[in-house]
């Protein structure tokens, strides 16, 4: 059964042990992907996500509800602060490209939901094993170059490029007509995000 | 595929890859979460829940002159929670001599318990007092003479201020570094 996010804060406040687990499982993957989308490496994204989860659990008494969705926005706020602090610890000399609240909120709201994740998984499963490896190594955690992938597969760099291109075209053909992906694209347009933010403020 | 079309494709691949612009970001955003991550999330739940329960327990916990390990063990017992996950999370090793690493781990827990800087520092000093073999409760009772009644952490603090002058230089150096780490972590957390 899906967790009712709007009831979670009260249950966490009452120190309901099950609510702590539900919260971590409901938000863990989202926080991980959020930090990955902000260019953190997998191990760092994992570590910052779990640190945020613990932080939310410990600060829950500081949350005050402002209607539906406010808990999620509060979690995002803590995640944003955690990310900025992490960034400063790593490289105090550089500044964030666009540290506006809007930017983080767009990244958060633009994250694919479970239906989109399932669609991509299905599309990936339809590729050959080699093509799947190429796409994974190129776009997932390691982000290898075509030359590095070629070394792994004992293929030329050029051959990897071509297979990669064809694999993406297959994925594009499958996903561009998938209802969940179409809905995600609509949601993800800047206009839709801006509208949602405006609705929240009303 | 002819050589010409492959070259055509390759030449476009670097600068303007002719697949939908939304696809690469989507792939990245749907990257599978590591299998071990779910277990990490459940560990985070256990730590947060235990710390929250210990924080609740601390509201009624007596201000006894306990070193950090004994204090945490006592709180966990009152909260009826296992302490080990919290120690692992913070990286606190109760059996090792206290120093900056111990202090940094202690701060994580102390802040989770919402202890103020002063109490965090006193409990760190109490840990060193324990290490040098100072039996604080009877010593303080003797010092207080007929005043009677239970002492509070502030009394321990002033008593310890006098006692530390007699400690060995290496212990004092570790204590200084530990206290510095605690102050710095609290200052940093306040800034954040």
Image (cartoon, helix red, strand yellow):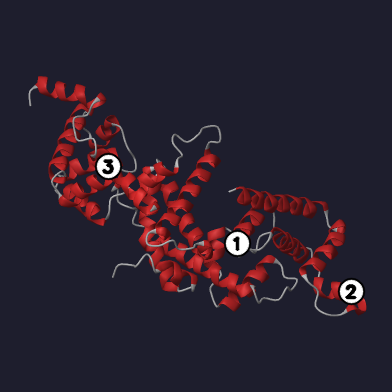
Q: Which mark is residue B80?
A: none
Using the rendered view, name the quadrant where residue A145 is placed.
top left
Tell me, yes or no, whether the two marked residues, 3 and 1, touch with CB atoms within 8 Å: no
Q: Residue furthest left?
A: B2
| Marked residue chain, label 2 | B
Q: Going by the image, does A104 lie left or right of B189?
A: left
Closer to the camera, A184 or B162?
Answer: A184
Please report the residue visible at 68 percent of the width from the left and 61 percent of the height from the top: B116
Closer to the camera, A59 or B177?
Answer: A59
Q: Check disc 3 and report its element: helix, strand or loop.
A: loop
Please determine whether, in this image, residue B16 is positioned above or below residue A72.
above
Which residue does the numbered mark 1 point to in the structure image?
B109
Q: Are marks 1 and 2 on the same chain?
A: yes
Q: Which mark is residue A189?
A: 3
Residue A187 at x, y percent in the picture: 26, 48
Q: Which mark is residue B144?
A: 2
Q: Going by the image, does A141 lie left or right of B95?
A: left
């Amino acid at each position: 059964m899906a967790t009712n996010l709007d009831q979670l804060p009260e249950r966490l406040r009452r120190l309901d042990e099950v609510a702590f687990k539900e919260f971590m499982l409901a938000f863990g993957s989202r926080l991980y992907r959020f930090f990955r989308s902000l260019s953190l490496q997998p191990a760092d994204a994992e570590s910052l996500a779990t640190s945020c989860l613990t932080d939310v659990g410990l600060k829950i008494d500081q949350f005050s509800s402002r209607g539906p969705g406010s808990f999620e926005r509060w979690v995002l706020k803590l995640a944003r602060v955690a990310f900025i602090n992490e960034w400063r610890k790593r490289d105090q000399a550089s500044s964030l490209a666009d540290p506006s609240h809007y930017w983080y909120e767009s990244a958060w709201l633009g994250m694919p939901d479970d239906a989109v994740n399932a669609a991509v998984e299905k599309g990936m499963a339809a590729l050959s094993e080699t093509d799947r490896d190429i796409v994974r190594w190129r776009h997932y955690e390691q982000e290898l170059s075509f030359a590095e992938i070629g070394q792994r597969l004992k293929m030329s760099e050029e051959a990897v490029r071509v297979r990669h291109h064809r694999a993406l075209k297959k994925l594009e053909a499958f996903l561009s007509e998938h209802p969940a992906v179409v809905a995600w694209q609509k949601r993800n347009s800047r206009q839709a995000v801006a509208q949602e933010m405006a609705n929240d403020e009303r | 595929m002819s050589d010409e079309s492959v070259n055509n494709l390759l030449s476009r691949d670097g600068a303007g890859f002719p697949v939908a612009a939304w696809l690469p970001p989507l792939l990245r955003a749907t990257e599978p979460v590591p299998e071990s991550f779910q277990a990490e999330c459940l560990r985070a739940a256990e730590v947060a829940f235990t710390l929250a329960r210990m924080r609740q327990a601390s509201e009624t916990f007596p201000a006894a002159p306990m070193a950090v390990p004994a204090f945490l063990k006592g709180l966990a017992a009152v909260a009826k929670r296992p302490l080990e996950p919290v120690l692992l999370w913070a990286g606190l090793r109760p059996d090792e001599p206290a120093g900056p690493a111990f202090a940094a781990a202690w701060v994580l827990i102390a802040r989770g318990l919402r202890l103020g800087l002063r109490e965090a520092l006193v409990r760190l000093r109490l840990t060193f007092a324990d290490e040098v073999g100072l039996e604080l409760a009877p010593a303080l009772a003797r010092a207080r003479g007929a005043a009677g009644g239970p002492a509070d952490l502030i009394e321990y603090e002033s008593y310890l201020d006098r006692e530390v002058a007699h400690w060995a230089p290496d212990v004092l150096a570790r204590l200084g570094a530990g206290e510095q780490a605690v102050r710095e972590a609290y200052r940093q957390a306040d800034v954040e």
